[in-house]
Image (cartoon, rainbow, N blue to C red):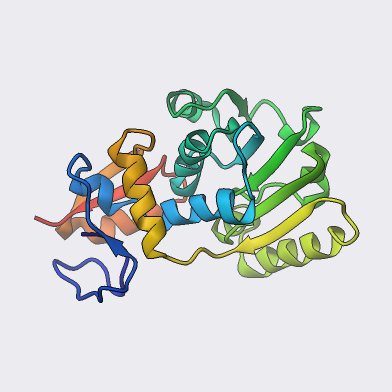
Amino acid sequence: MFGGGKGGFAEYICVRETDAVSKKPAPVSFEAAGVVAVAGCTALQALRDHGRLESGQTVLINGASGGVGTFAVQIARALGAKVTAVCSTRNVEVARSMGAESIIDYTKTDFTRSGKRYDLVVDIAGSHSFSECSRVIAKGGTQVGVGAAGIQQQAAGTLRAFGHFLGTRITSIGSSNRVVSLFIASLKKDDIAFLGELMADGRVKPVIDDRFSFEQVPEALRQQEKLHARGKIAIAIA
């Protein structure tokens, strides 16, 4: 079984049959199954449920190289979308390997001034305001803000993160576009099973930046706190 439950960093946890767990497909490694639950569900729900992404549409993912972003790029492709990934120079090749059709290096180009428009903008990094992001949203398009972690990274604190959220809500009033402000994903059994299918047939492959042993959990947490991991950090419980 794989998925999510209450508890963590333990050899065993107890889950109910109704919890967000599913049978692990044979082709999927334990490592891959172990890192998919929260980030994978967040990416899936941002794209499919909140973004209402349809096959053939265009999507821009700001923050494409992190845990949620690496899943978002691949899931968007699996749903039939044309993906533009926004990431730093060191992650360009990773984004390309995940199937992004276009890549914007944010250290060189401001995607909000690119002149291009997208059916869906998924903002994970929180590095731009709604007004700035609205420049690249097609008429009738959608913007989805994912969580607060990326915004706190950029804004250095909860107060600024709340300010970003409030500013988005206010400035989006009257917009012809749909705006979903900073949703927090919920783990769902059906979504876990769907992610398992995507991994089993190779359409989604978790990107793992580093691996730690169970004894190295404190070091793994320190690595995660830096907020610059490429993809996920895995902890092996032998």
Left or right of residue 155: residue 34:
left
Drawn side of residue 94 relative to residue 49, left or right: left
Residue 140 visible within the image: yes
Percent x, y for residue 102? 60, 23
Residue 219 point in image, percent of width and height: 27, 55
Q: Relative to residue 158, is residue 120 depicted above or below?
A: above
Query: In the orientation shown, which residue stands out farthest toward the left?
Result: 238
Quadrant in the rendering for residue 215: bottom left
Q: Residue at x 19, y 72 (%)?
A: 13
Residue sitting farthest toward the right: 174
Q: Quadrant of the C terminus?
A: bottom left
At which x and y percent is residue 57?
Answer: 66, 34
Q: Nearer the viewer, residue 51 or 94?
A: 51
Q: Vertically, is 140 above or below 38? A: above
Q: Is residue 206 among the parts visible in the rendering?
A: no
> How many numbered discs?
0
Q: Residue at x 26, y 68 (%)?
A: 8
Give the quarter of the image for residue 139.
top right
Q: Position of residue 156 (x, y in %)?
A: 61, 59
User: Which image quarter holds the N terminus?
Assistant: bottom left
Residue beneath the point at 51% across and 33% down: 77
Residue at 64% in and 37% down: 59
Of residue 88 and residue 180, the one placed in the foreground of this image is 180
